[in-house]
Image (tube, rainbow, N blue to C red):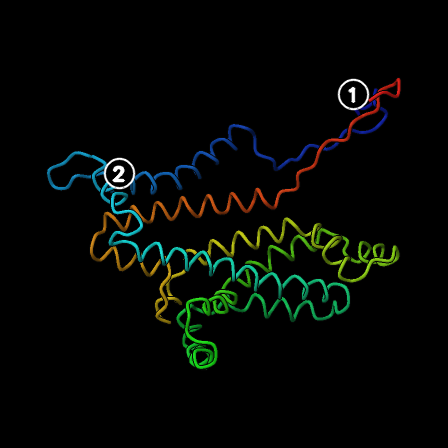
Amino acid sequence: MNRSELSSGRPAAPAVAHAPSRPVRTAILGVIGLVFAVPIVAMVEFTLRKGLGGGHDFSRWSALFAGGASGQYRPVLTALGNSVGLALGTVLIVLLLLVPTLLLVHLRFPRLRRLIEFVCILPISIPAIVLVVGLAPVYSVIAGIVGSGVWTLAFAYGITVLPFAYRAIQSNLDGVDVRTLSEAARTLGAGWGSVLLRVLVPNLRRGILAGAFIAIAVVLGEFTIASLLNRITLQTALVVVSKADPYTAVILSLLALGFAFVLLLVIGRLGAVRTRPARRPTPGGQP
């Protein structure tokens, strides 16, 4: 026991043996930053090339923005809108089905946890092309009932993102004493709706946001299912553009990457809880 422990009267917290030092952390973050930065810088440099003559300029960027929303690349904007709508629809479907189910299993049917985990993790082991082969007859029936709009892809995407959303929410659920919180709320007279929306969901906010982030990232980058089911999304539109003009396709990919980053940033800001520090009373009792 050292001097600081003797003066405070309690043992000091043990140091974490496996925590890396600050230079090691800086080096790790630097390497990870390079892994992400090098491809993006290479894409930007590629779009600025003049061609065989050498040199760089912004002619392709200016030509793209000169056309505006009515230019020849307007279908890409339509496809981007489709992908954003699919991302939001997929998030709603997955969260509305997954969160109440996990809470119900956790509170009432704990023996079913292994079965639910197996069902939720199973789609990650199935290749997308195999999943499409199984979903094609289902979508032929859906097309005859409600039509074949691009929004119907949200059901297939919900199956695709289910393993990632499950892991994010379940890990948060394991760290929260859901049973005690629900019993305390019920003892105070709250209904099950209030318990779910005002007690449990706020405590699972981090897991829900993490699941939403992953779902949006997966949907915006998904190509195989949309291509095989003949739906127009951002990735399928970029492939069509790349066959005619690879430079413009890379520019649109950079813009889509920036849009996805801003979208996730906005969702994170909206989901953050804004708390104000409590004001300490003054000795004289005045504010």
Counting from the top left corner in percent of width and height, residue 236 is at 33, 61
Instruction: Identify residue for label 1.
Output: 4
- Quadrant of the rendered image containing residue 148: bottom left
Can you say whether 171 is above or below 142 in the image? Answer: above
How packed is label 2: few (under 14 Cα within 10 Å), some, or many (20 or more)?
Answer: few
| Residue at the (64%, 69%) spot, across then down | 116
The furthest residue to the front: 70
- The three-letter amino acid code for the residue at tag 1 is Ser
Q: In the rendered view, does 78 fall on the left or right side of 86?
A: left
| Dot 2 or dot 1, earlier in sequence | 1
- Residue ID at (42%, 46%): 259
Query: In the image, is 287 to the left or to the right of 228?
Result: right
Of residue 70 and residue 266, the one placed in the foreground of this image is 70
State left or right for residue 245 relative to residue 149.
Answer: left
User: Which of the 4 image quadrants contains residue 275?
Assistant: top right
Furthest toward the left, the residue is 53
Label 1 crowd (10 A; few <14 / some 14-19 / many >=20): few
Amino acid identity at mark 2: Glu
Q: Position of residue 248 (x, y in %)?
A: 25, 48
SS at mark 2 in the image: helix
Label 2 vs label 1: CA separation? 56 Å
Which mark identifies residue 145? none
- Residue 111 against residue 196 in the figure, above or below: below
Please name the residue shown 77% across and 31% down the image: 278
Give the mark toward the camera: 2 or 1: 2
* Residue 224 point in image, percent of width and height: 37, 65
Q: Which residue is mark 2?
A: 45
Percent x, y of residue 84: 45, 56
Q: Quadrant of the N terminus?
A: top right
* Residue 97 in which image quadrant: bottom right
